[in-house]
Structures are given as structure tokens and as C-alpha cells.
Amino acid sequence: MLRAVLKLCCGITYPHLRTRCVSLCLYCVLFLVSSLFCRSAASSSETEAAEQRTAALADEDVFYLKQGDAALNEALKIVESEDGWKLETAEVIENGDVICSKVLTGNRKVFRLEAELNASTEELYDILFFRVEEMHEWNPSIRRIKVLKHVGRNTMVTHEVSAETAGNLIGQRDFLSVRHSSKSESRVYLGGASTRWESLPPQPGFVRAEDGPTCIILHPLQDRPDRSRFIWLLNMDVKGWLPQSLVNTALPRAQADFTKHLRRRSKSVTMKLS
């Protein structure tokens, strides 16, 4: 457009028309410069906004990574400590599983279950972590688990809703958790704790319980690499107005039931693979 106007101005011999054309040419130059400036400013603003979103996302990811790692480390300190553990009653224990409990500072009781499972460590790792959304298929106490966010391969944020079952003494709860995993040689460590998610506040009709720090330790048996040692620290505040004696009875029973269903699931997976 500017080139055409310049040619037109150069070809005009009448002074008054040439003056008008020069004015038009100057106007076009100013218009083009102004347009380029606005586009540059808009592009700069969009870039800045994108950088701010990226920075916020990075900060959020770092928060979940740090929280998951810290929860795992804290839970390992509890489960590996030697003092204060007492054997729970044997009425809920099957297959040689052992459940112990201890009281932490603040009067919260935690439970440690130890069992041997007929599955490899990698198979259990896959069932309990990477395929966590399938847990409702084999554990009737779970209504659903949804992964809200993956942070890398080893950390995720999940929303879990418990099922309404006849033997559920605590009632329906939902959980918002960060889950984290790590490996050291032949051992697998799974940790977790309650977390935050702005777009998912407590849901109507559910009591939002808080878990963690909690952890699971998996490692192969020394003489049977196709079998695994399963150690689970259950550390949960179920919230709501429930007698603590009822909670302390229900939680180890929930551990025993979960392990029973996990044993069946791992057995079926092993049979499919063999």
C-alpha cells in the first residue's frame, strides 16, 4: 500500500495534488508503524502471560513433588521405628499376616501390617500405583479413584471415594491425596498424604478424611523372588463424630480386608502372566 502511494505521489505534477498525496503517504506510514507497535505489544503481553502460567504450573508441580517425598520419608521413619509397637488382636488376621499398632504424639493411633503375597514386587507396584484407578474392580471398599494430575512418572494427585458397604463401620469418606513412589535396588516405596486441590473442595454428602503420612514397602523374599514382603503403615484421621474406640477397631479390620482382596488380585494377575 505504501509503495503504491509513493509511486502515485511521484507521478503527480500538480503541486496541490502532490501535497495531498504526501500527506496521505505520511498518514499511511504512521498507521503501519502504529499497527506494528500494537502487534508487538500484544505479542509481548501474551508471552508474559504464558510465562506466568508456566511458572505457576511449575510451582504447583514442585509443591506436589516435595509433599509426596516428605510424606514418604516421614512415614518410613514411623514404620521402621522399633519402639512402641503392640500386636493387635488376632481376630482379623489371616494367612499369617501381622498387624501392630502404636500411638503417636497427639494421641493418633497408627497401624502396621506385614504380609507375604504370592506376586512379584513389580506386579504389586503396577497394581497399587500405576493402575490405581482400577482399584475399585478388586477392592469392594472403594467406589472410585481418579487421578487428577500426574507429576512426572512417580507422583500423582488422586481423589478417592469409599464405597457404602455393609461392613463399613466408619461410613463413606472421600480423600484428596498426593501419592509418590520411589525405588531403591529391589525395594519399592509408596508414600502418600492428604493434599489440596482448589477446584475440588469437600463434596456434599461425604466426610473428607485425611490420610498420611502413610507408606507401603514392597520387596522380594530372599529365597522366592516371585513372592513379596508387603509392609503397610496406615495413618488416618477419619474425621466426623465417631468414638475413637470404634475407629481403632475399624482401621485394622480395613487393613486386613484390603490385604485379602489384594492377595486375590495379585494371584489372578500372576495366573494370567504364567
Image (cartoon, rainbow, N blue to C red):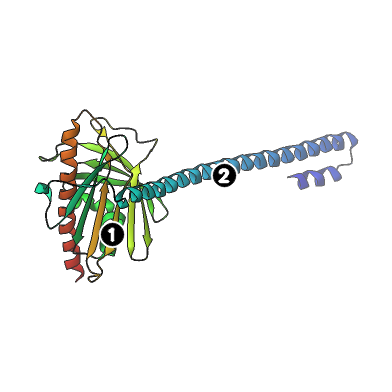
Toward which corner of the image does residue 105 lie, by quadrant? top left
Q: From the image, which quarter does the C terminus lie in?
A: bottom left
Amino acid found under the numbered disc labelled 1:
Leu
Q: Residue at x 38, y 62 (%)?
A: 184
Residue 168, x across and y down, in percent: 14, 39
> On the rendered structure, is 27 left or right of 38?
right
Q: Nearer the viewer, mark 2 or mark 1?
A: 1
Instruction: Say which of 99 and 148 sits in front.
Output: 99
Tell me the number on the disc at residue 51.
Answer: 2
Instruction: Say which of 80 and 21 sits in front.
Output: 80
Q: Which residue is mark 1?
A: 218
Residue 63, x across and y down, in percent: 45, 44
Q: Residue at x 37, y 66 (%)?
A: 185
Q: Is residue 26 visible?
A: yes
Give whichever of discs 2 and 1 has the lower sequence position: 2
Amino acid found under the numbered disc labelled 2:
Glu
> On the rendered structure, is 97 left or right of 152?
left
The residues bearing labels 2 and 1 have C-alpha atoms spaced at a distance of 41 Å
- Does 141 appear above or below 222? above
Residue 220, x across and y down, in percent: 27, 66
Identify the element where label 1 is drawn.
strand
Report if the CB atoms under discs 2 and 1 are less than 8 Å apart: no
Residue neighbourhood size for the residue with mark 1, other residues' Cα within 10 Å, grouped as few (<14), some (14–19), many (≥20)? many
Q: From the image, which quarter does the N terminus lie in?
A: top right
- Does 233 appear above or below 223? above
